[in-house]
Amino acid sequence: MKTLRPLLLIAGLGAVAPPSLPADDFAFVAEGNPLITHKFTADPAALVVGDTLWLYTGHDKEGNQRGYQMKDWCVFSTKDLKHWVEHETPLTIKDFSWDKTDDAYAAHTVEKDGKYYWYISTNGSGIGVAVADRPEGPYKDALGKPMLTNKDCFASSHGWTCIDPAAFIDDDGQAWLFWGNGVCYYAKLKENMIEIDGEIRKIDFAGLQFTEAPWIHKHDGKYYLTYASGFPEKIEYAMADKVDGPYRYMGILNEIAGNSNTNHQAIVEFKGKWYFIYHNGALQNGGGSYSRSVCIDELHHQPDGSIKRIRMTSEGVAPVTD
Ligand code: FUB
C-alpha cells in the first residue's frame, strides 16, 4: 500500500499537516482549479457523509503520459471545499486478485447502513466492489471475483465496455448500478450491495450518444442521467420521472474540457449548493489526456427542471460554511 508523508509546507502548494492528522494523511488548501495539484487525479466520484464531502478519484501516475497508467485510487475529504485532506491510499488494483489488466479505471463509492461500497472498474477484467466500515477505508474486495464482466454486458465483444460503475440509492432505499462504455447498462443491486438483482438492461432514448461515465442524481423528484458523449468528450444529460426511465435527452451540460479528451463528471449537493466535479488536463507541467486533474464548479438546476450549462472556471468554487 502506498503511503503519503505528512508535510508541513510545500512551496506553492499550500500544504499543511495539522498535528491532529494521522501520520499518512496529507492536508492541503485548494487554490481554484485544478483542485488537487500535488498529483494527477481523474474520474471523480463524490459522497457526502454528515458535514464532510468525500472525493474518490483515479490516479494518473505522472505528467506527460501518452496512455493510461493508473494503479490505485485516492480518497480526499473536506468540510468547506477549501481545506482538504488526502487520506492514505486505501485501494490499489492489486487488491483485486482476479484483475488481469493492472489498470485502475473509474470508480464510485456509496454508503449504505454504515458501510461503504467502492465499485471499481478495470480495463477488461470487469467491475468489482470493495467494502469498508469507514469512508477512508481500509477497503477489502468484497467478493474475491468480479461483480460484472463482459458476459453480463450482453456478452459484448467490446474490450472495455464493462467500466465506469455509478451507484445510486433511491429514496426508497433501492440501490442501482449504471455502467458502461459504448452502451449504458443498468441493474438493481441486492440489499447486500455486492450482487446484481435481476435483469441487466440498456438505456436508450432519442439523441443518446453514449461514450461512458454515467452518473445519476435526483433533484426535485426528477432523475438526471449525465454521461460522457462523443470523443473528445462533452458531458450531456437526460431527465426522467423514474430512475430506470424512460429518459428524455436534454442536451449538453459541459463542453469539452481543455487539453483532455475525457471529462468524467460527478454531481453532488453539499451544504445547500450543487457541484459539478470533473477532470481536465489543465495542470501545468505535464497535464493532458492521460495526466488529468480533478476540478470543481457550481451546478445550477433551473426552475423548468433543466440544468444550466456548466461554466468551467480557473477560480473554482468559494469555500462553504455550515
Ligand atoms: O480513467 C480511465 C477512463 O477514462 C475512465 O474509465 C473513463 O471514464 C475515462 O475518464
Image: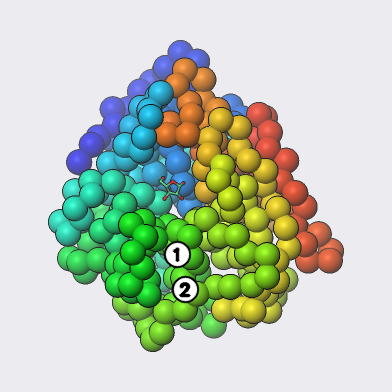
What is the number of the mark on residue 179?
Answer: 1
Indicate the position of residue 27 as horizontal and vertical percent values.
42, 32
Indicate the position of residue 243 as horizontal and vertical percent values.
58, 76
Looking at the image, can residue 296 be seen? yes
Question: Between 220 and 22, which is closer to the camera in this rendering?
Answer: 220
Question: Between 257 and 21, which is closer to the camera in this rendering?
Answer: 257
Residue that lies at the very extreme toward the left in this rendered image: 97
The quadrant holding residue 205 is: bottom right
The answer to the question of whether label 2 and label 1 lie on touching residues, with beta carbons closer than 8 A, is: yes
Q: Is residue 17 above or below residue 235?
A: above
Residue that lies at the very extreme toward the top in this rendered image: 11
Residue at x 25%, y 58% (from the top left corner): 125
Q: Is residue 25 above or below residue 162?
A: above
- Mark 1 residue crowding within 10 angstroms, few (<14) / some (14–19) / many (20+): many
Indicate the position of residue 14 as horizontal and vertical percent values.
49, 21
Q: Secondary structure at mark 1?
A: strand
Residue at x 51%, y 20% (from the top left corner): 284
In the rendered image, which residue does mark 2 sit on?
186
Q: Amino acid at mark 1?
A: Trp
Mark 2 within 8 Å of ligand 1, using the beta carbon: no
Looking at the image, can residue 134 be seen? no
Taking the image as shown, residue 175 lies to the left or right of residue 100, namely right
Q: Amino acid at mark 2?
A: Tyr
Residue at x 55%, y 73% (from the top left corner): 203
Question: Between 236 and 176, which is closer to the camera in this rendering?
Answer: 236
